[in-house]
Amino acid sequence: MGFDLRQALLEAFEETALMSGASLLSAVVIGGVLGLLLYATSSRLFVRNRIINQTAGVIINVVRSIPFLILLVLLIPLSKAVVNTTIGPAAVVIPLSIAAIAFFARLADASFSDVNQGVIEAYISTGASKWSVIARILLPEALPSLVRNVTVTAVSLVGFSAMAGTVGGGGIGDLAIRYGYQRYQPEVMLICVAILILFVQGIQLTGDLIAKSLDKKQ
């Protein structure tokens, strides 16, 4: 093949893990906060605010409406400004994180909305503060659903990171495109596909086990 396949696969997997992991962290932290903001500003039990809710919702929907490859190209100037490069895993993390934040924000909002409102109302009736309700009731009750949605986001990010390979983003997708497709080495393509399948299955299995262990209803 003219190159060290094992070393190339190892480096590509590390790049994919780095891109997916960094973006997932951004999604959980920032997207989770945005999801909580969407929920809190739409609920009469917290701080209903139509202007903030609709503004945040429109911004999130706009980002989610843009296909990732187009978003990747649109954000090249931002990637250049932040990490001083437009290629490689570091550059891809910026658009990948933005896409993941918008994606997870909506999922987090749905998780919070699924929490039994009667439980929240009962706790509020005891005189508890809004922050106490969020910390002691809302987050624990929504946690199993949040973990499942983190898993969904992580799986999607692996797919997005693979797509980034078409524009020199690095990772398993980049290896599959450069060697498996452009250099007509189908065995490389098949190995990359197998690695991605195993990676995704591992993420899904881990997420399902954690969510199941946290779910009090099961």
Image: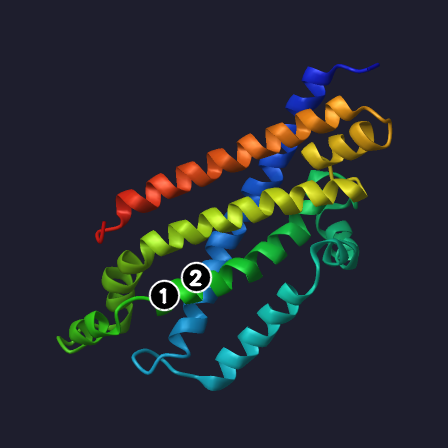
Q: Which amino acid type is marked by label 1?
A: Phe
Which residue corresponds to the image point at 46% horizontal and 40% vertical from the top-left? 204
Q: Which picture quadrant has residue 49?
A: bottom left
113 is higher (above) or lower (below) than 18: below
Q: Quadrant of the N terminus?
A: top right
Which residue corresponds to the image point at 34% horizontal and 46% vertical from the top-left? 211
- Residue 205 or residue 153, whichever sits in front: 205
Left or right, residue 146 beside residue 118: right
Distance CA(mark 1)–CA(mark 2): 6 Å
Q: Residues within 10 Å of mark 1 (few under 14, many from 20)?
A: many
Which residue corresponds to the image point at 39% horizontal and 50% vertical from the top-left? 147
175 is higher (above) or lower (below) than 105: above
Q: Name the mark on residue 108.
A: 2
- Residue 112 or residue 97, whichever sits in front: 112
Q: Which amino acid type is marked by label 2?
A: Ala
Q: Which residue is mark 1?
A: 112
Query: Can you name the residue that lies furthest to the bottom here?
Result: 50
x, y percent for residue 121: 21, 76
Query: Can you name the residue that lies furthest to the right here?
Result: 183
x, y percent for residue 26: 53, 51
Q: Residues within 10 Å of mark 2 (few under 14, many from 20)?
A: many
Q: Name the mark on residue 74.
A: none
Query: Can you name the residue that lies furthest to the left here?
Result: 126
SS at circle 2: helix
Looking at the image, do the residues carrying marks 1 and 2 touch, with CB atoms under 8 Å apart? Answer: yes
Left or right, residue 162 beside residue 39: right
Left or right, residue 138 beside residue 30: left
x, y percent for residue 100: 57, 55
